[in-house]
Image: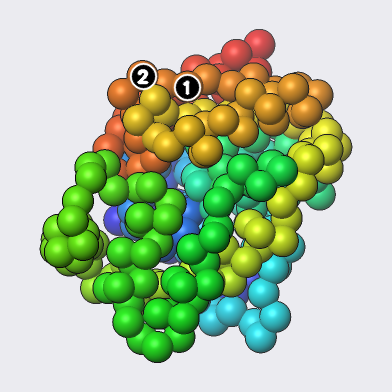
């Protein structure tokens, strides 16, 4: 565990020493899920992992929720720490991109951001998911989420889906379910042609994996054309949870190499 400090209502766990990198977790994720990534970067950077609101020692969310409220927290952490680089994963990648719209950064790196371009992120299942969350049926809601988002890595019968959810996702993930509907709502609200992101001035690296559903990686080359100073890479053998579970060392290596190139 790193050093934890509450900054403006959000807890931040910090590791290492060197130029600062702020890490923004994805949906259904806590700061501790990114500890292996942070430790892999800590030899060259001070890594500040944000515990987003409604989680751990961070304050509860306000009554009105938006990506911009999340961006306010990220910008506050940047100000407090002096960091100039942001890394975001999944929905955290969407937050990171919007942070790049509001503040000049030395670099911005996102892994499969929760961006919908011209309806690319199919949320036709969101209404059913929201109903199940509202009814407290969190295991069933998680099953709907994973099926809708195509994030379970094999085909299964309904019974196998339920068993898989119980085995792969614990109480912590299920307890985070009530936070998810608002985040899905923001992905839907922000669906666009992507032209807003042309205002991001930071050098930007867009990462994805070959084992991830195409709707999450397909936006990367589109965004790379829109952002004025961006490049993208689809990494062999990596899936959507590479930063937090399956390949944090490789994601850290990609991030380190990119930041070294930007510093030359």
Please identify the quarter of the rendering in which residue 66 is found.
Answer: bottom right
Whether residue 243 is visible to the viewer of this picture, yes or no, is no
Residue 141, numbered label:
none
Whether residue 135 is visible to the viewer of this picture, yes or no, is yes
Residue 260 higher or lower than 69, as above or below: above
**Secondary element at image label 1:** strand
Mark 1 = which residue? 234
| Quadrant, the N terminus | bottom left
Residue 236, numbered label:
2
Measuring from the top left, give residue 48's x and y in whole percent.
50, 50
**Secondary element at image label 2:** loop
Residue at figure coordinates x 83%, y 34% from the top left: 198
Left or right of 144? Residue 264 is right
Measuring from the top left, give residue 163's x and y in whole percent.
14, 63
Residue at figure coordinates x 39%, y 25% from the top left: 210
- Are discs 1 and 2 less than 8 Å apart at CB? yes
Residue 196 higher or lower than 40, as above or below: below
| Quadrant, the C terminus | top right
């Amino acid at each position: 565990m790193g050093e934890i400090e509450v900054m403006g209502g959000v807890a931040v766990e910090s590791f290492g020493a060197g130029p600062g990198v702020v890490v923004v977790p994805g949906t259904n994720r806590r700061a501790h899920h990114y500890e292996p990534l942070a430790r892999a970067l800590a030899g060259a950077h001070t890594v500040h992992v944000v515990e987003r609101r409604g989680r751990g020692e961070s304050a509860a969310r306000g009554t009105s929720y938006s990506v911009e409220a999340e961006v306010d927290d990220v910008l506050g952490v940047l100000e407090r720490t002096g960091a100039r680089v942001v890394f975001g994963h999944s929905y955290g990648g969407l937050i990171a991109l919007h942070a790049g719209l509001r503040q000049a950064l030395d670099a911005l790196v996102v892994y499969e951001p929760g961006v919908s371009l011209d309806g690319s992120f199919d949320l036709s299942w969101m209404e059913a998911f929201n109903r199940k969350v509202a009814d407290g049926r969190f295991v069933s809601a998680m099953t709907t989420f994973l099926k809708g988002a195509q994030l379970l890595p094999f085909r299964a019968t309904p019974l196998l889906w339920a068993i898989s959810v119980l085995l792969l996702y614990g109480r912590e993930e299920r307890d985070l379910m009530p936070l998810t509907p608002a985040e899905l709502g923001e992905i839907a609200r922000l669906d666009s042609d992507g032209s807003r992101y042309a205002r991001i001035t930071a050098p930007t690296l867009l990462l994805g994996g070959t084992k991830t559903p195409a709707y999450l990686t397909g936006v990367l080359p589109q965004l790379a054309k829109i952002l004025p100073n961006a490049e993208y890479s689809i990494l062999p053998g990596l899936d959507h949870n590479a930063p937090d579970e399956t390949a944090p060392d490789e994601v850290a290596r990609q991030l380190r190499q990119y930041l070294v190139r930007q510093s030359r």
